[in-house]
Amino acid sequence: MLRIPLRLLLFLCSFSLLAQEYFPKNDGVKTINSNYTAFTNAKIHITPSQVIDNGTLLIKDGKVVASGLQVTIPKNSTVINIEGKSIYPSFIDMYSDFGVTKPKRESGGGRSPQYNPSRTGYYWNDHVMPENNAISKFNFDNKKAKELLNAGFGVVNTHIQDGIVRGTGTLVALNTEGGNETTILEQNSGQYFSFSKSVTSRQSYPGSIMGSMALLRQLYMDADWYAKGNSKTKDLSIEALNKNKNLVQIFTAESRANGLRADKVGDQFGIQYVILGGGDEYERVNEVKATNAAFIIPINFQDAYDVENVYLSQSLALSDMRAWNQEPSNPKVLAENNITFAFTTHDLKSPKEFKAKLMKAIEYGLSKEKALEALTTTPAKLLGKQTEIGNLNKGAYANFLITSGDIFDKKTTVYENWVQGTQTVVNDMNTKDIRGDYEFLLAREAYKMTLSGELSKLSSEITVGDKKRGSKVSYSDNWLTIAMTSKDSTKQEFIRLVTNVSNSDNLNGKAFFPNGSELTFYAKKLDSETKEEASKKADSSKVKEVTPLTYPNMAYGFKELPKQETLLFKNATVWTNEAEGILEQSDVLIKNGKIVKIGKDLSDSSAQVIDATGKHLTSGVIDEHSHIAAASINEGGQNSSAEVSIEDVIDDEDIDIYRNLAGGVTTIQILHGSANPIGGRSAIIKLKWGEDAQDLIYKNSPKFIKFALGENVKQSNWSSYERFPQTRMGVEQLYIDYFSRAKAYDALKKSGKPYRKDTEMEVLAEILNKERFISCHSYVQSEINMLMKVAEQFNFNINTFTHILEGYKVADKMAKHGVGGSTFSDWWAYKYEVNDAIPYNAAIMHNAGVVVAINSDDGEMARRLNQEAAKSVKYGGISEEDAWKFVTLNPAKLLHIDDKVGSIKVGKDADLVLWSDHPLSIYAKAEKTIIEGVTYFDIVRDEMMRSQIMKEKAELINQMMLAKNKGLKTQPIKKKKKEHMHCDYIDHESH
C-alpha cells in the first residue's frame, strides 16, 4: 500500500477530476491517477442515523467506493489513519446565490411609473423571468467557496435572487480545484419564485403582495392555456415555466405569513413548493404543518437588544423581545411536529456565524441527529440527489468532513473538508489542541491563562490576581507566541512568551522581557474541567427556557384561545335594532354561538350569569370601510386590479384588531384602497383576536369589490401623467371599456367555446351577473351620478357609495337607484374635492330613504364609532335608535350579512357588546365584546394583561442584560412606528 504525504495527496486525488479524458494536454505528460484513498479507524457518520465506530472510508475518482467496518483496501491505496477522529458528510445549502452575479438596479427613473414591459417575446410582466438560469451568470468564487468549506459545506444550490419568477438554479460542488465540468452537479436544479419584484425593471405592477399573488395565479392559468396550444403568439417565458415544472419548486417567503400565502397559491394549481421560511414558523406551527410543505430554514437568530437605556427600552414591542427569546426554538418545534426542513446560511453576514447559530438551536432542544439531517440527507432528498450527496454510501460523491469529534460540540475542530475527493485543509490535523486553563510563575508573579476559541484563531485571557493583562496570541505550526502587557501600566511595554508545543499538555518555552532579559517559561495545564466549568457545562446542557407563546404571539394575546360559552345577561338595557326597540331590564341568553332567548326572568343551569344591571347590551359595531388587519391595501400598478384580493393578505396579528374590539367592533369590511378606478376585492372579517387569518373571514362571505372616483384614481396628487385615465371623463370611459370587454368575455365563456381564463374579467363578469357588489370611493356629485348611469347601462346596481360626502346633493337619485351610503360623520375640507361636505350628510341621505352607515376608514377612529354615530343625533336630529343602526344594522344590510348580525334577534350570531353606559355616550366603555359566543375582549382581563405585560418585559430585559454581561452581541433599539393605512396608502413590501 502507498503512503504519501497528505499535501501531495491533494494533487493526486484531484488530478483525475481536472483532466477530461477527451481534452488534449500540452503542459506535461498525460497520466491518469487510478489510486484509492482509505481513511481508517474513524467514527463514520454514513448518514445521520447510521454511525460506524472504527470504520474505513474508501474513495476513488471523487466518489465513495465503500464505507463500513470490513472494507477491503486495494493494494494501490493511500492509507490515512485518523484514529480518534470523526467523518461526517459535508453540508448542503439549497438556498444560495454563490457565484451568481448580483442583478443591478435599473438606473434612471422619473416621476411617472413604467406600466408596460421592456421586453418582447416574453411574458407581459418583466418580473416574471422563468427563462433565466443561474448557470448563465455563474462564476466560481474561490474566496466565498473557502468560507463555505470552512463552515462545513460541500454543495450549494445557487440561483439568481431577483424577481417574482426567478428561473432555474444550479447545483454546485465547492471543489476549488475543479472546473465547471466537474463542479456543476445539475445545471437546472430547481425553479425559484418570490413575492418581490426584480430590481432590473421599473415596471410598476405588481406593487403589493396581493398583486404578486394575483400575477402568479394568472401566469399559471396562462401557462396551462399555452401548453394546450391555444396561444397565437410565442412566449419564451411561459415555455420556460412549463419546461421547468417538474423541477423542485422553491419559493422565497421569508416569513410564516408569506409562506402560508405561497402555499395557498401553490395548492390552487397542484404545486407543492419548498418554502424558504422566516424563522417564525413556531408561532403557528399547526398551520405550517397543514401546508404539507418542506421548509428551508434560516438560523439568523436575533441578538439581544441593548436595553441599558431605560427610556429607550420602553419603546420595545413585546413581540420583538419575545422573538429574541423564542426564535432559536423554531427548529426544535418544526422537528417535534415532523415538518421536513433543511438549514441555510441565507441572511447570515458570513458563513463563519453558522456554527454558533446552529449550536444555539441545539441548546434550545434540537437533536443533533435532526440538525445533521437538515444539513445533509434532507436537502439532498428535496433536490432529488439523495444517492449522490448528503451521505457516504457507495457511489455518493466523496464529500466529507474530518473532525476532532462530535461536530456539534463547541470544542470540536473541523480539520478537513473533502469535496469530490479534493481536500481542503481547514485546520491542520497535526496541530495539537492546546485550549484550556494554565497557571505559571514569572518573575515571582503568579499568572493564570485561558486559551480559547478556534485553533486557527485562538484568543487568550491572562490575569494576575484580580487584574487582567492585555494579551494577543498566535499559534501556527505548533509554535505558540503570546504578547502580554507588562506590570507597569504607565508604559506601553510587552512581555513575549514563546514555546514549541510538544506532546506534553504543559507548555515549555522562554519569556522575553522589555529590558532584553529572558527567562525560562513553564505553564502547567490545569484539570480539563474545574467545578466552575462543570457548572457551566451542566447549565449549557439544559434546554433553554422559552417564553410561552400566545395567540397572537404579542401583547394582549391569549395563552389559550378562548372557548365558546353559554352566557346569560341579566337585567340589561337591550338595544335590539328590531321592532321591539330598546328593552329595559331584559335578559339575553346565548348558546352555541347564537342568540337563543330574549326576555325577562330567563334561566339556564349551564349558563354563566352576567349581571348587566345598569348596563347596555347591543349588537356588535360593524365598520363598513376599514383598512386595518391587512398586509397590503393598494395595488396601484395598473388602472384595474380586480384580480387581487384582500383575503390573500389578512394580517391576524394587527394590534388594531384588539383595539377595535375594545371599542365594541366585531365585524369589518377591509377594502382595497383608491389607487385605481377598479380596485381589488374586499375581505369581510370578524375580529376573532388570536385566530388565524383564514378563520377571521366570514363563511360564505358575500362578494365585494372596491371601485374609486375622483382625485386619487386620476392621480391628481401623484405627479404621474402616464397612466390612463387622467381626467374624470376618462374614468367614465375606462368603466365602459372594461364592462364591455367583460360582457364579451362572459358571452364567450357561456358559449362553450375555448377561452383564456382571465381573473380580472371573471370578477367583472360577476358584477354584470349580479354576483358581486361594488363599494365605491366617491366624493363629487357629478361622478356619483355618472357611475350610477354606467351601472344602469350594463343592467346592474352600485351597492354602496363610501365617503359619499356630496351624497346629500343626490340623495333622491341614490334612493331611486337603490344604492347605500357609508359616510363620515363630520369630516370636511381636508382636500379640494370635499370642500362641499357637511355634517348633515348622513341625516339628509337617511331621510331620503338611503340605507346609511357611518364608517371609519381609520384604525383609530374605528375605536369610537359609537361616538361617531352619536353625532348624527346632533347634526340632523336623527333618533338615538336610528343613529345606533348607522354603525350596526345598516352596515350589516350594506354588506348583505344582516341575516347573521346587526341586531339582537333569536337565531342571529351572538356578536354582542356589553357597555358600561349608554352606547352613544362619550363615557361608555365596552366591558365585554363577544363574537359567536366567544369573549374576545374583556375589560377586566385587559387590566390584568397590562401588569402581566410589564412583568414579562422586565424579565426579558433582565435576560438581555445578562446576555450582554456575558459578552454576547447586542443590537441597538430602533423605534418602530405603526403605519396606519388609509385609502391612499401604498404598499412597499414588494419593492
Image (cartoon, helix red, strand yellow):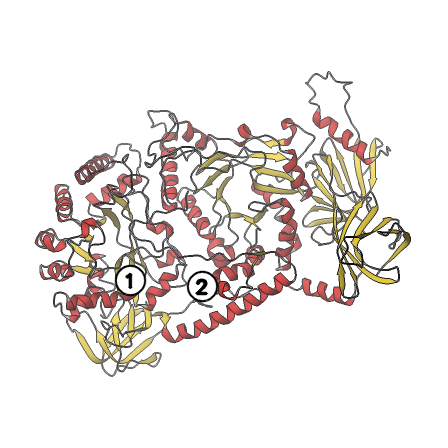
Q: Quadrant of residue 197?
A: top left
Q: Quadrant of residue 882?
A: bottom left
The quadrant of the image that shows the N terminus is top right
| Residue 953 appears left or right of 743 | right
Q: Nearer the viewer, residue 184 or 922?
A: 922
Q: Secondary structure at mark 1?
A: helix
Residue pointed to by mark 2: 551
Q: Nearer the viewer, residue 767 or 890?
A: 890
User: Residue shown at 91%/53% (left/top)?
Assistant: 519
In this view of the protein, can residue 799 be seen by the observer? no
The quadrant of the image that shows the C terminus is top left
| Residue 439 appears left or right of 684 | right
Q: Earlier in the sequence, mark 1 or mark 2?
A: 2
**Looking at the picture, how far across and down is residue 808, in whole percent?**
11, 56
User: Residue shown at 49%/62% (left/top)?
Assistant: 312
Q: Secondary structure at mark 2?
A: loop
| Residue 234 appears left or right of 386 | left
Q: Amino acid at mark 1?
A: Met
**Looking at the picture, how far across and down is residue 501, in whole percent?**
86, 48
**Looking at the picture, how far across and down is residue 964, in whole percent?**
61, 61
User: Residue shown at 39%/37% (left/top)?
Assistant: 220
User: Residue shown at 9%/59% (left/top)?
Assistant: 848
Residue pointed to by mark 1: 861
